[in-house]
Image (cartoon, grey):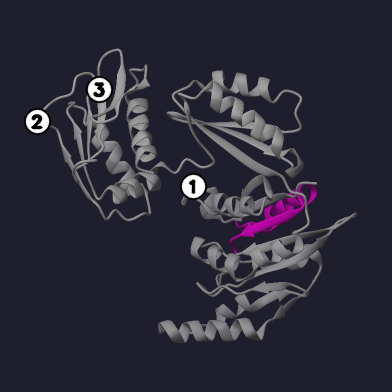
């Protein structure tokens, strides 16, 4: 049976919209790496009763629960007190956690205050996970249900501290505890320049009556096809994806995550130098490249330059000078009203698209460059 997890964010600043809470997305992604499905995200204010009610709701619906926030040293940080009452276990002082706070305050020249002691109290029987990036350690308690126990993990709110406690024990605990669970896998296909309704209709036909769950995500101009399945059904997914790739070859981009940002930078670095020429007034191709550079964590080491002029203008083509005979690699982007093609000086012309959608044209050109270089 697939494990189901629920995620709860505690904090009035979250519910009021004062901050954008990215922890649920982060935790759901980390759980996905362990093939644990996230079923629900909840958020509640710093209210004792609301927090208890949220615990009860999540307990009834999930196999695991992850809670962030309310573990700090101030008066509105009382998550551990709610937990103590909820599971009817007293809070106990943990000397090791106090010594950890003492060391951290000394390291950063911070005055140690008495109210920080409240971060060192944990429900009796709790498993503690060290927080190397802050003063509030995470902990886990087992909440007894009629038929089983539900592990509740309590994490600090700051994202860097979530990363720390995850690496310092939570991930290892989950891997050891649920190593033999038959959890679902997720496979994705990335499609470009096709209506979501069209590709969804064909996907539903291909996987009709198959033991899989389908989902879709449109993020212009891409459509992501998602298929959840049990490990024993992988051949069904492979066969279905092969059909989609074959029937929609012009629209197929890749299987798995669309890593266009990092893949583009890696391709340019491999080339060593690249000149991007966009002769149109909109300069939308230039803007898209800058967007990629700003969003990727990869470092550009190649010589990348931009221009709106070219010496010899190719007719009705997007084309890439592949640089077989020189160190210069140039993308020329010009658009004919009806047809867009990608041409190599030495390799001839390959049809790229029959479209006038500017964004699709640009994305196709970038993917073609990535594929050619790799």
Residue position marked by numbered label 1 in the rendering = 17
Disc 1 to disc 3, how far (Cα)? 48 Å
Q: What residue does disc 3 label?
A: 317
Q: Which comes before the other along the chain, label 1 or label 3? A: 1
Residue placed furthest toward the top: 338
Nearer the viewer's eye, disc 1 or disc 3? 3
Count of numbered badges drawn on the protein: 3
Quote the CA–CA distance across marks 2 and 3: 15 Å
Answer with left or right where residue 60 lies relative to residue 257.
Answer: right
Q: Which residues are magenta?
A: 45-70
Residue found farthest to the right: 146
Q: Residues within 10 Å of mark 2 (few under 14, many from 20)?
A: few
Specify which label sits upstream in the sequence, 2 or 3.
2
Residue located at (60% from left, 35% from top): 226
User: Measured from the top left, where is residue 225 in percent x and y?
Assistant: 57, 32
List x then y, in percent, for residue 359: 34, 27
Residue pictured at 37% horizontal, 40% vertical: 370
Would you say the residues marked 1 and 3 are in contact, meaning their CB atoms lie under 8 Å apart?
no
- Which residue appears at 76% of the width and 46% of the height? 2
Horizontal and vertical percent position of residue 99: 58, 86
For disc 1, the neighbor class at 10 Å (few under 14, some 14 to 19, many from 20) is few
Q: CA distance from mark 1 to mark 2?
A: 53 Å
Q: Can you identify the residue that label 2 sits on? A: 311
Q: Is residue 332 left or right of residue 44?
A: left
In front here: 283 or 82?
283
- Whether residue 44 can be seen here: no
Looking at the image, residue 309 lies above or below residue 199: below
Asked if the magenta segment contains residue 201, the reply would be no
* On-image quarter of the C terminus: top left
> In the drawing, does residue 108 fall left or right of residue 247?
left
Determine whether the residue tagged by mark 1 lies in a helix, strand or loop. loop
């Amino acid at each position: 049976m697939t494990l189901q997890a629920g995620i709860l964010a505690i904090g009035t600043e979250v519910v009021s919209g004062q901050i954008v809470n990215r922890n649920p997305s982060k935790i759901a992604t980390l759980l996905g790496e362990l093939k644990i499905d996230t079923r629900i995200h909840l958020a509640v204010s710093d209210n004792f009763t609301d927090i208890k009610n949220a615990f009860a709701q999540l307990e009834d619906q999930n196999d695991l629960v992850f809670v962030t926030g309310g573990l700090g040293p101030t008066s509105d940080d009382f998550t551990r007190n709610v937990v103590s009452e909820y599971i009817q276990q007293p809070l106990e002082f943990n000397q090791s956690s106090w010594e950890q706070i003492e060391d951290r305050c000394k390291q950063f020249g911070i005055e140690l205050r008495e109210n920080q002691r409240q971060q060192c109290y944990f429900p009796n029987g709790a498993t503690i996970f060290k927080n190397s990036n802050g003063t509030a350690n995470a902990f886990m308690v087992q909440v007894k249900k009629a038929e089983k126990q539900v592990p509740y993990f309590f994490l600090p709110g700051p994202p860097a501290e979530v990363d720390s406690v995850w690496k310092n024990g939570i991930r290892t605990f989950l891997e050891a505890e649920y190593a033999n669970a038959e959890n679902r896998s997720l496979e994705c296909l990335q499609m470009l320049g096709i209506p979501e309704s069209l590709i969804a209709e064909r996907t539903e036909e291909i996987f009709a009556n198959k033991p899989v769950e389908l989902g879709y995500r449109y993020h212009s101009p891409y459509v992501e096809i998602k298929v959840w399945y049990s490990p024993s059904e992988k051949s069904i997914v492979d066969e279905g994806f092969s059909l989609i790739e074959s029937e929609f070859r012009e629209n197929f981009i890749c299987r798995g995550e669309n890593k266009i940002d990092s893949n583009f930078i890696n391709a340019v670095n491999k080339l060593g130098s690249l000149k991007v020429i966009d002769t149109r007034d909109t300069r939308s191709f230039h803007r898209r490249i800058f967007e990629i550079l700003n969003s990727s964590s990869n470092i550009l080491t190649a010589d990348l330059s931009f221009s709106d002029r070219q010496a010899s203008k190719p007719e009705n083509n997007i084309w890439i000078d592949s640089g077989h005979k020189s160190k210069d690699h140039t993308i020329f982007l010009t658009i004919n009203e009806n047809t867009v093609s990608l041409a190599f000086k030495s390799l001839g012309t390959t049809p790229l698209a029959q479209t006038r959608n500017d964004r699709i044209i640009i994305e196709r050109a970038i993917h073609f460059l990535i594929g050619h270089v790799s």
